[in-house]
Amino acid sequence: MMILDSLIDGIYKKAAVRKIEDVRIGLGYTAVLLDNGSCGLAYTFRNELGYCCCILKEAGQIKGLKCGDVIQWVKDANLARTAVGLATINALIQEDVKDYKCGNIFNNLQLTPENILGVIGDFGPFLKNIRKQVKDMYVFEKKVHKIQGYMYPAELTDKYLPKCDVVIITSTSILNKTFEDIIKKCKNAREIILIGPSTPLYPELFKKYNVTYLAGVVVCKAEQVLDIVSQGGGTRSLGNSVKQACIKI
């Protein structure tokens, strides 16, 4: 993916002088702490990791590794390595995140009754309220095998995503290498929002892909994040250990 190469190139100088202080691969998220105290998150695809006895061959040896090497893992086919790579990238980006607004992006979307909304990923209860605000809504999810209300199988993005003028994309699409394929189908969208704790808050890069909002997190309490991730916590468990950050591009 070109976007992964661009991410790596954009932060490589910063990565070259940093090392991994700690790493936690939890059931919900993967967290990486750097030697300067910066912390980043990425989603853990636990159901896709399989039942292999050795999910991550580097286990027990990651602390102390150079970030310049670890960020390359984001391109790996092994989704555990990919998560560690992206969490490291997000940790490196954290100190440069400025001019962001706090709050849930779902509460700040400027939607109208004329909008056709496309959503990549199921964001649960938030979507029920949003559905009332728009003309049509298509939610694409891999686990859906036939059209059920506003839920659509992921393979139908070719047909329906070009109809959407507002698109919300889960940042896990970067981890599973589907982002660039999805973004090509958003040719008629006036707003494209990349959302989730895995989101790299790097507006200069995503501007090239016509993304208009980044909605991720800024880690406020790194040690608390590590504990929550280690204990199987998900998005809601992170609580005040992070700030929800929205950046208008």
Image (cartoon, grey):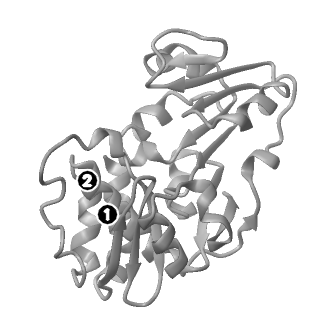
Category of crowding for the residue at label 1, using alpha-carbon neighbours closer than 10 angstroms: few (below 14), some (14–19), many (at least 20): many
Q: Are marks 1 and 2 in contact (CB under 8 Å)?
A: yes
- Image position, residue 69 (x, y; %): 21, 73
Amino acid at circle 2 = Lys
Residue 2, percent across and down?
Answer: 33, 49
Depth check: give the residue in front, 71 or 243. Answer: 243
SS assignment at label 2: helix
Of 73 and 190, nearer the camera is 73
Residue at disc 1, secondary structure: helix
The answer to whether one can see residue 215 in this image is no
Total tally of numbered discs in the picture:
2
Q: Residue 115, can we see it? A: yes
Q: Position of residue 51 (x, y in %)?
A: 19, 42
> Residue shown at 21%/46% (left/top)?
77
Q: Position of residue 153 (x, y in %)?
A: 48, 17
Q: For the point 49% across and 56% down, which residue is it? A: 198
Q: Quadrant of residue 231?
A: bottom left
Look at discs 1 and 2 and give the one toward the viewer.
Answer: 1
**Left-right relation of 142 to 166:** left
| Residue at the (28%, 54%) spot, across then down | 80
Q: Is residue 182 left or right of residue 9?
A: right
> On screen, 109 above or below 94?
above
**Which one is in front, 238 or 80?**
238
The C terminus, quarter of image: bottom right
Query: What's the mark number on residue 85?
Result: 1
The residue carrying mark 2 is 75
Give the label on residue 72, or none.
Answer: none
Whichever of callouts 1 and 2 sits on the residue coming sooner in the sequence is 2
| x 68%, y 71%: residue | 240
Q: CA distance from mark 1 to mark 2?
A: 8 Å
Whether 131 is drawn above or below 153: the answer is below
As shown in the figure, which amino acid type bears the numbered disc 1? Gly
